[in-house]
Amino acid sequence: MTDLTLDLARRIIDGAIACRQEKRFLPLAVAVYDVRGSLKAFGAEEGTSLKRAEMAMGKGLAALAVGFGTRTLGKMAVERAHFVNALQSLTPHFVPVPGGVLIRDADGRLMGSVGISGDVSDNDETAAVAGIVGAGLKADPGVS
């Protein structure tokens, strides 16, 4: 299994921000967690709005907490609101909208997660996937 190194985490952040710049998204906050749920690296661009850091962290932690990307959690929030509300009460800063993406190695094993906030959730997720793939890893955003 590949470990999520600090270098890989920084490459994910750099790749997400490069995607944001190319696509002209709003400035982003990017949180990268290892498989244990420990914050590995964080970056916030100039111009991110208030609380974007906490939202990015909440997306990343939510994905790790349940073992699938927050796109799935967003769908579940509509279909199974009581379940998602229960999860939110158990996990601080739990943000169940797209932008929390699991990081997997070449064999599909879980390495950690990325949470991004700054633009609309679909754009946050796009940047997260780009950062992960750009670092040579597999992105798992959940089902749509």
Image (cartoon, helix red, strand yellow):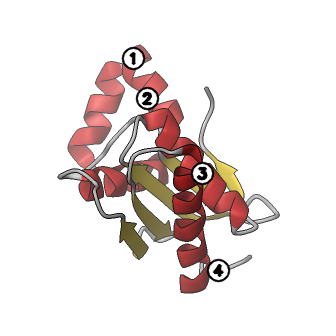
**Residue 56 visible, this angle:** yes
Q: Amino acid at mark 1?
A: Val
Disc 2 and disc 3 in contact, CB within 8 angstroms: no
As helix, strand or loop, the secondary structure at mark 4 comes to loop
Q: Quadrant of residue 143?
A: top right
Residue at numbered disc 2: 74
In-image side of 60 versus 71 (left or right): left
Find the distance from the CA under tag 2 to the CA under tag 1. Answer: 7 Å
Percent x, y of residue 93: 25, 51
Disc 2 and disc 4 in contact, CB within 8 angstroms: no
Earlier sequence position, callout 2 versus callout 3: 3
Give the label, 3 or 4, closer to the camera. Answer: 3
Find the distance from the CA under tag 1 to the CA under tag 3. Answer: 32 Å
Give the label, 2 or 3, closer to the camera. Answer: 3
Residue at numbered disc 3: 22
Residue at numbered disc 4: 3
Image quarter hosting the C terminus = top right
As helix, strand or loop, the secondary structure at mark 1 comes to helix
Find the distance from the CA under tag 2 to the CA under tag 4. Answer: 28 Å
Q: Residue at x 57, y 44 (%)?
A: 23
Please rate how many residues cluster around mark 3, counting C-alpha atoms within 10 Å: few if below 14, some from 14 to 19, many from 20. few
Percent x, y of residue 77: 38, 24
Earlier sequence position, callout 2 versus callout 4: 4
Find the distance from the CA under tag 2 to the CA under tag 3. Answer: 26 Å
Q: Amino acid at mark 4?
A: Asp
Give the label, 1 or 3, closer to the camera. Answer: 3
Disc 2 and disc 1 in contact, CB within 8 angstroms: yes
Residue at numbered disc 1: 78
Q: Quadrant of residue 81?
A: top left
Find the distance from the CA under tag 3 to the CA under tag 4. Answer: 29 Å
Front-most of 96 and 44?
44
